[in-house]
């Protein structure tokens, strides 16, 4: 999404802090109530999540 130069900065190694956070997330749940409250399932892929983050949080700009 952001290009090879940006992707090259990613370190693919476990972070114990993040592992602890994600390990506490529920595994199976029903999102019916969330949808009723107006939350959407707009993000279908990880690329979607990154694109939306760049748009919403970074004003459409990122450091390449």
Image (spheres, grey):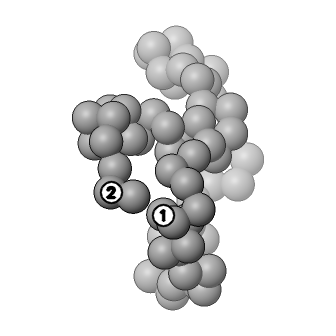
The answer to which of 16 and 45 lies nearer the viewer is 45
Q: Position of residue 50 (x, y in %)?
A: 51, 45
Circle 1: is it few (<14), some (14-19), or many (20+) Cα within 10 Å? few
- Circle 1 residue: 6
Q: Quadrant of residue 13?
A: bottom right
Mark 2 and mark 1 in contact (Cβ < 8 Å)? yes
Q: Which mark is residue 63?
A: 2
Quadrant (top left/top right/bottom left/bottom right) for the C terminus: bottom left
Q: Position of residue 61 (x, y in %)?
A: 31, 42
For image coordinates 62% across by 80% down, the residue present is 12
For image coordinates 59% across by 62% down, the residue present is 4
Q: Secondary structure at mark 1?
A: helix
Q: Earlier in the sequence, mark 1 or mark 2?
A: 1
> Label 1 vs label 2: CA separation?
8 Å
56 relative position to 42: left or right = left
Q: Position of residue 26 (x, y in %)?
A: 62, 55
44 relative position to 8: left or right = right
Q: Position of residue 41 (x, y in %)?
A: 60, 24
Q: Quadrant of residue 52?
A: top left
Q: Is residue 33 visible?
A: no
Q: Secondary structure at mark 2?
A: loop
Q: Is residue 51 visible?
A: yes
The answer to whether residue 10 is above or below residue 4 is below
Q: Which mark is residue 25?
A: none
């Amino acid at each position: 999404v952001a290009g090879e130069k940006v992707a090259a900065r990613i370190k693919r190694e476990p972070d114990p802090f993040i592992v602890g956070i994600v390990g506490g997330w529920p595994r199976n749940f029903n999102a019916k109530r969330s949808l009723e409250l107006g939350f959407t399932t707009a993000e279908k892929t990880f690329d979607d999540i990154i694109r939306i983050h760049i748009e919403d949080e970074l004003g459409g700009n990122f450091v390449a």
